[in-house]
Amino acid sequence: MARRFRGESDHKVDSKGRVSIPASFRRVIESCDPDWTEGLPPRLILVYGGATREFLEGFTIEAMDEVDDKISKFPRGSAKRKAMERLYSAQSVEIVVDDTGRIVLPAKLREKIGLDGMARFVASGDTFEVWKPEAYDASIDALDEEGFDPDVDPSVYLDGDLD
């Protein structure tokens, strides 16, 4: 089973788009890149998606391989396969982590989500998300409107018994 991302943290994005990835995230990225060995830079995939996406989604190489395998099970040329290929193949970039633990976020991606100095890295199981901190905070506030009760211990939702 692939390692999972944990935690969240804010990191400064410089004018060239360089940002440090949380150290614990780098360990997961390294362990889930089948071509990575000590001394080589680990790789990851950033999916930036369509207009409705307010964040970038980071996939390890192994996690993206799983997505690609699932996509390939749909009939070639089907609408669902085309939609998923556009999201996960066309609207994504392969990124290399440098020897200081930084990545470069292309200007197009920074502009898409409005990054202007700080990026929030948020664990999401076998992927992670990169948000503008204010947008992430607003997304958390919106959970209340979607039926998530902030006054209840979230572990009660694990069994799926509560709606």
Image (cartoon, rainbow, N blue to C red):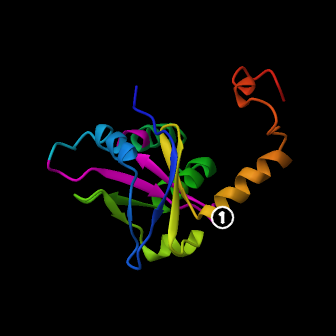
The residue under label 1 is which amino acid type?
Answer: Glu
The percent position of residue 79, horizontal first and vertical second, equals: 62, 51
Q: Which residue lies most toward the left here?
A: 39
Q: Label 1's element? A: helix
Residue at position x 58%, y 68% from top? 113
Please name the residue that numbered disc 1 is placed on. 134
Task: From this view, report whether residue 58 is shown above or below residue 118.
Answer: above
Can you give x and y, in whole percent of width and height, for residue 96 in the image? 30, 58
Q: Quadrant of the N terminus?
A: top left
User: Which quadrant: the C terminus?
Assistant: top right
Q: Position of residue 159 (x, y in %)?
A: 72, 20
Q: Nearer the viewer, residue 26 or 47?
A: 26
Residue 71 versus residue 163: which sits nearer the camera? 163
Around disc 1, counting alpha carbons within 10 Å, would you say few (fewer than 14), some (14 to 19), or many (20 or more)? some
Residue 93, by quadrant, is bottom left
Quadrant of residue 131 within the rendered picture: bottom right
- Taking 16 as reference, is 131 above or below it? above
So how many labels did they put on this image?
1
In the image, the segment drawn in magenta is 39-63
Q: Quick check: 108 left or right of 53?
A: left
In screen coordinates, is 144 left or right of 52? right
Magenta segment: does it hold 41? yes
Question: Quick check: is 29 in the magenta stretch?
Answer: no
Residue 120 higher or lower than 67, as above or below: below
Q: Residue at x 43, y 40 (%)?
A: 63
Q: Is residue 130 left or right of residue 21?
A: right
Expressed as whole percent of the image width and height from the top left, the position of residue 132 reads: 59, 65
Question: Residue at (58%, 59%) from the top-left corner?
Answer: 55
Q: Nearer the viewer, residue 162 or 23?
A: 23
